[in-house]
Image (cartoon, rainbow, N blue to C red):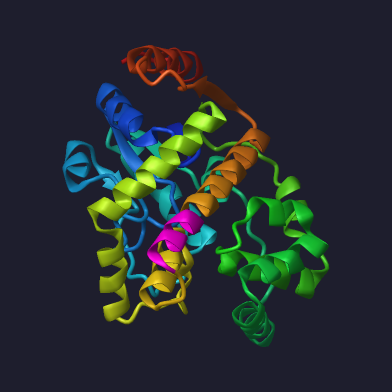
Amino acid sequence: MTQASIKPNLLVLVGPTAVGKTRLSLQLAADYGAEIISGDSMQVYRGMDIGTAKATSQEQQQVPHHLIDIHNPDHPFSVAEFQERASQLIFDIHDRGKLPFIVGGTGLYVESVCYNYQFSESGSDEAFRNEQAEFAVTYGAEALLERLRQIDPESAERLHANDQRRIIRALEIFHLTGERLSERLKVQKKQSPYELCIVGLTMDRALLYKRIEERIDQMIDEGLIEEVEGLLKQGYGKQYISMQGLGYKEMIDYLQGHLSMEAAVELLKRDTRHFAKRQLSWFRHMKDIQWVDVSELGNFSAHLDQVHAIISDRLKFER
């Protein structure tokens, strides 16, 4: 079997943070002989384990996982790199007779692979990038996001204020070409090179927010502050995009005395709720997703049966 002769099956599981993707993905991987490709833009970084909610080492031993711990936090990981690496992994896993299985919540990254987005080169303007970064330092992340909102409200709605690299890139594209990032995405053909099955998990909003807050409390108990402190000691500060991620920026502000512990945790909970809302908004604009409501937490087996039925229908094979 070669890349040119057959379309590989590709299973994808998406959903907002804290909805329960990890538990379900491990069971599905066991049921179908799958290998998991992380579809999360932050789990690529070594030493950033608790704040990115990586599968534990024990869970990673149960099922092969890919695109986890492949870079140090100073590496500027991009959607183009993710697409290239994930696409190659899909064929490698397929050629070994296993099912490629993307699991994650970074919408653009997942979508770029599912539909083989073409990222045309727009060039770069380092002076412009530096100017925007300095603006963010002076006036804050929200002010930078507001700049994007003025020219491309759709992209601004989908991006978190902490996602400085992608905000600046969207501004840079408009600066260089006069073209909005959101318009670029709309003209992608969205035809998949794979036999594609995308399952989306959703949940009652109030319950999801409660689970987010409980997860953050658990992260603190498990050592998130100590994890961030260790990264700072290694020289990974807020100048790196990775350290602008949820959980890291807030704890840096606490450790550097800019926020109280209580204020940092409350800010993290609020921003994570907002992030989950944006994730759901992104996924609801994607085509081909089959949704499963997992609000009834005690019905895992019923939810699993629903997903099995979707996979059987879309990929035409059984466990």
Q: Residue at x 50, y 38 (%)?
A: 209
Residue 236 placed where, x, y %?
36, 77
Residue 9 placed where, x, y %?
43, 30
Q: Residue at x 31, y 51 (%)?
A: 219
Residue 279 placed where, x, y %?
57, 43
Q: Residue at x 51, y 34 (%)?
A: 194
Q: Residue at x 54, y 54 (%)?
A: 271
User: In front: 275, or 56?
Assistant: 275
User: In front: 194, or 278?
Assistant: 278
Residue 57 placed where, x, y %?
18, 47
User: In front: 307, or 193?
Assistant: 307
Q: Is residue 239 magenta?
A: no
Q: Quadrant of residue 214?
A: top left
Q: Is residue 109 above or below residue 194?
A: below
Quick check: can you spot residue 267? yes
Image quarter in which the N terminus is found: top left
Q: Give the dominant element type of the magenta stretch: helix, strand or loop.
A: helix
Q: Is residue 173 above or below residue 157?
A: below
User: In front: 318, or 25?
Assistant: 25
Image quarter in which the C terminus is found: top left
In the rendered structure, the answer to whether residue 206 lies left or right of residue 124 reads: left
Query: Magenta residues, as a range?
Result: 260-268
In the rendered structure, the answer to whether residue 107 lies left or right of residue 82 reads: right
Q: Quadrant of residue 48?
A: bottom left
